[in-house]
Amino acid sequence: MKLIISNISGIPIYEQIKQQVKSAIMSGELHADETLPSLRTLAKDLKISVLTVTRAYTELEEEGFVKNIQGRGCFVLSRGSELLKEQLVCKIENSLSEAINAARVAELSGEELHRLLDILMEEKTDE
Amino acid sequence: MSNILKSVKLDFSLVRPYVKTICFTMVLPAVFAAINRSLLTGISFAMCFIAMTSGYTFSITEKNDMERLYSILPVRKSELVVGRYAFSIIMGLLALIFSLITHPVILSSLGETVSTFDIACAAAVGIFLFALYTVFQLPGYYKFGSIKGRVFMYIPVAGFLATLFLITKIPADNSGWLITVLSSPVMLVLLAAVLVVIMYVISILVSVKIVQGKEL
Amino acid sequence: MNNYLEVKNLSKSFDNFRLHDISFTLPKGYIMGLIGPNGSGKTTTIKLILNMLKRTEGEVKILGLDNIADEQAAKKSLGVVFDSNYFSDDWKVSQVEKSVSVFYENWNTQRFSELLDKFHISPAKKVKELSKGMQMKLMIACAFSYDAKLLILDEPTSGLDPVSRDELLHILSEYIEDGEHSVLFSTHITGDLERAADYITYISYGELFFSGGKDEFVDSFRIVKGGREELSDDLGKKAFGIRDFATGFEALIKTEDIKLFAHLNVEPATIDDIVVFTSKRGEQYE
């Protein structure tokens, strides 16, 4: 698994680790039952504090992506990717309802809104 | 190995680079003995010289700020102090033994007769003088350091000059108790031994007190 | 025993300086940075821990052992690195080992020579021929050769080039990797600690300002920036320090006060920012 820590992004290091572990789970790079890199080794390799990695791993565990087994490491849970998907779907729903609300105010029809989405998606794929 | 022995070993490794210089300084007293045709003067001179080197360990540790090393080693400060005394005594004894062998050989080759009694006397005087110098020097170095306390390096010189003066005085002053003591080697050695032990004990206690009270 | 170093209510009075009521705890397996401007009491704290100075009050426990009553036992498991080396200049590196190893029953000669290899130190070189960085690594090699559980470093990075500083941090992270060793590290160059330290103890003018997790420490402060006209009285009261100049100002505030100044430019603070602003409390410079 690839982990890149940026010092200038302004995002806390533990958050960067969390995000990258999550996207590795999503992309299938990290499978269920695979272990995350050892906490202390990761801290050494990235030259960051052990407590920072501990915080990232603990929060990932609290959010249900991994399970920490004392003395054996941090395992990716099988429902990790589903969980992430659920979270993302939820996020999409929120954004879409926001868009719908805005469309209402702007008096856009449902059809026009659909078309807008299609155009945007086409632009994204073109990129 | 006891902590005191370890401290002695550490002191040896401190002065190791200076061993040649120290050995060389032992040649001069032999020459002095030959010129003066006197074993007693030679030995007194030798003990004066070796006592002058007792500040080496202090100046090396001071130069390299090695108090910091001593303060992290797992030994008591008192053990380091006793080790330093032991080291200085060993150096003194080595110088004494070397001189007690070389000086009589040189003197005999010059036609002087050196009796066992003379050698025993010289040994007792040598030990006594060396102890007398170092029991003042070491607490002085501990208290003031080797730079501020360099005046203590010259204690042996003053002592040596005083000894020379006394040696010339002794035959003139032949009425006192001194003659009784000097005429009996057993008394002489006993008196010297007791004095030496008492002086060292007091000196070590004073040094330990100084070191324990020191803040770095 | 889970705490490798416990300092409780440590105080020391000098004629012109007072270290007052310092307490902190370093658990096993972590790195703690001891920070503060020069003259704030970092070295005094370390000297008190090592019993090089006599404390006026308080208690120090090294691996659970009292630093005075059990001094010898405690020092068997303690490694110390000072800002300059404490060996005789004339010793060869091999002589350093001979002189020091006798004092430690568990000295591992093989480990020492492996470490020399790793640090590229030639055993035939004299101590005075080694660079400052090399001398520091030699002190570390000694401490590692008797498997010191707690390593205390006093200003180890002052006077070191960036390469040696980075090497040192790498050595320290490796050292604590197994979770059985801890490091107390005093420095005024806090950039070194920004990433590697787990805990921060910040001493300012002889008083304890903070001791705890580094992330927590850094997170609890923010830097606000704005034009001079935006420098309100309210901000003046909340700020730990304000740097005021012709075209604007910068101030350090507590993260909890961030809402009050949301209209201004707010940035995360670095350890350096925190030390600089809190040490200038009440006075404006420029």
Image: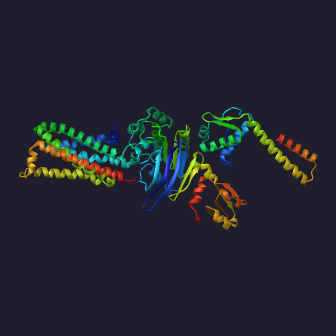
Q: Nearer the viewer, residue B50 or A63?
A: A63
Q: Is residue B110 visible?
A: no
Counting labels gives 0
Image height of A100 relative to A43, above or below? below
Quadrant showing the C terminus of chain C: bottom right
Q: Nearer the viewer, residue B50 or A109?
A: A109
Give the x, y percent position of residue C28. 53, 42
Q: Residue furthest left?
A: B175
Q: Is residue C140 visible?
A: yes
Image height of C251 relative to A32, above or below? below
Q: Is residue B3 left or right of residue C248?
A: left
Q: How is the image coloured?
A: rainbow
Give the x, y percent position of residue B216. 40, 52
- State the image quarter where residue C76 is shown: top left
Give the x, y percent position of residue C276. 58, 58
Give the x, y percent position of residue C27. 54, 44
Q: Is residue A70 left or right of residue B207?
A: right
